[in-house]
Amino acid sequence: MKCAIIADHLGQHPVALMCRVLEISRTGLHAWHRRKPSARAQRRSELDIQVQDAFVTARRREGAQRLSRRLRRGRRQDADRTPTGRESLHRQGLRAKAGRRYKATTNSRHNFPVAENQLNQNFSTERPNQAWVSDITYIQTDEGWMYLAVVLDLYSRKVLGWAMDSRMTATLVCDALLMALFRRKFPRGVIVHSDCGSQYCSKEHRSLLETYGSVPSMSAKGNCYDNAAMESWNHSLKVEAIHGERFATREQAKAEVFDYIEVYYNRSRLHSTLGYVSPDQFELENIA
């Protein structure tokens, strides 16, 4: 340990001084330098490099659980007995981004009709396009707020549609729904669940659902558990891409959201609900 401390501070203090303060001989220090690292130390060093590389590649979005599983993919069956990413993260002082609470954006004070809740907090489905969930969240920029509407398939947790604008309008949620419908080739009979905000209850959104044969479903007023799967996605976005970042312009925020959804989340984020595979991989393996 003493020799390692001296090695870490070479060039900062005289070697003779550090040896005297730490009570170690110069001969002992030279012997330590010549000594070959143990196999365990080499494995630990290799693991640290892999963990740090994966951590940086994921842009601090992934903690020990996902990093460990990502590193184990493609390894031998006995890989579970290798040192974990948690130990390496702790050893290197690497910490994933942390979350914080965000206020709600829903405006439920309106006179529009509210649809019946078709899901009743059941967020498991047997096939794609059986039920989608949707919501609006927001991102702060130096130019003002940027609002994001998202549509998520409960089967694979894949983001099918999304739209962003500086205003929280009915057009915003309709654009996100249209993207989802287009990507799925306009399936009929999909349950489209949302909160009972004015945008989702608007004539424009209700008309869009009717036109393409979708079934509207809405959470009870003020009950976040009725749309828990979507709330969970919003939280992941904020923690993994937004929290701690500063966006000078709305375009910068939009570029970050694009990168998170289209490059990271759908394609490579390991999802616990899916057995730690990405939404795209889950669909590839389970949809004939």
Image (spheres, grey):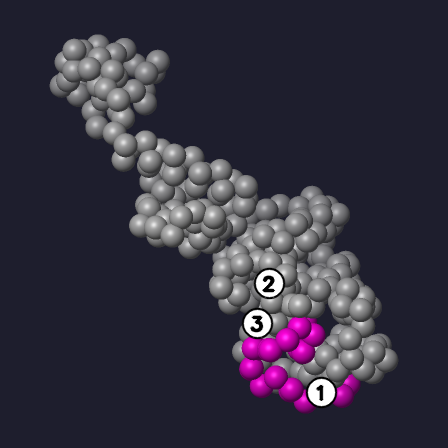
The kind of residue on which mark 1 rests is Ala
The kind of residue on which mark 2 rests is Glu
Vertical comparison of 30 with 118: above or below: above
275 and 58: which is toward the camera = 275
Q: Quadrant of the C terminus?
A: bottom right
Element under disc 1: loop
Mark 2 surroundings within 10 Å by alpha-carbon count, few (fewer than 14), some (14 through 19), many (20 or more): few
Are the residues at dot 2 and dot 3 in contact (C-beta closer than 8 Å)? no
- Say which of marks 2 and 1 sits in front: 2
Image spot of residue 41 (x, y percent):
29, 33
Image spot of residue 275 (x, y percent):
49, 64
Mark 1 surroundings within 10 Å by alpha-carbon count, few (fewer than 14), some (14 through 19), many (20 or more): some
Magenta stretch encompasses residue 68: no
83 and 179: which is toward the camera = 83
In the rendered structure, which disc, 2 or 1, sits on the residue that comes first in sequence?
A: 1
The kind of residue on which mark 3 rests is Ala
Task: Look at the image and give the residue range highlighted in magenta.
Answer: 106-134
Work out how far the residue at label 2 is from the one at label 3, CA to CA, in angstroms: 22 Å
In the rendered structure, which disc, 3 or 1, sits on the residue that comes first in sequence?
A: 1
Magenta stretch encompasses residue 129: yes
Residue 169 occupies which quadrant of the picture? Answer: bottom right
**Residue holding disc 1:** 115
Vertical comparison of 257 with 41: above or below: below
Q: Which mark, residue 285?
A: 2
Image spot of residue 130 (x, y percent):
67, 78
Residue at 33 percent across and 36 percent down: it is: 43
Residue 158 occupies which quadrant of the picture? Answer: bottom right
Q: Is residue 157 found left or right of 11 in the rendered image? A: right
Q: Is residue 85 visible?
A: yes
**Residue holding disc 3:** 229
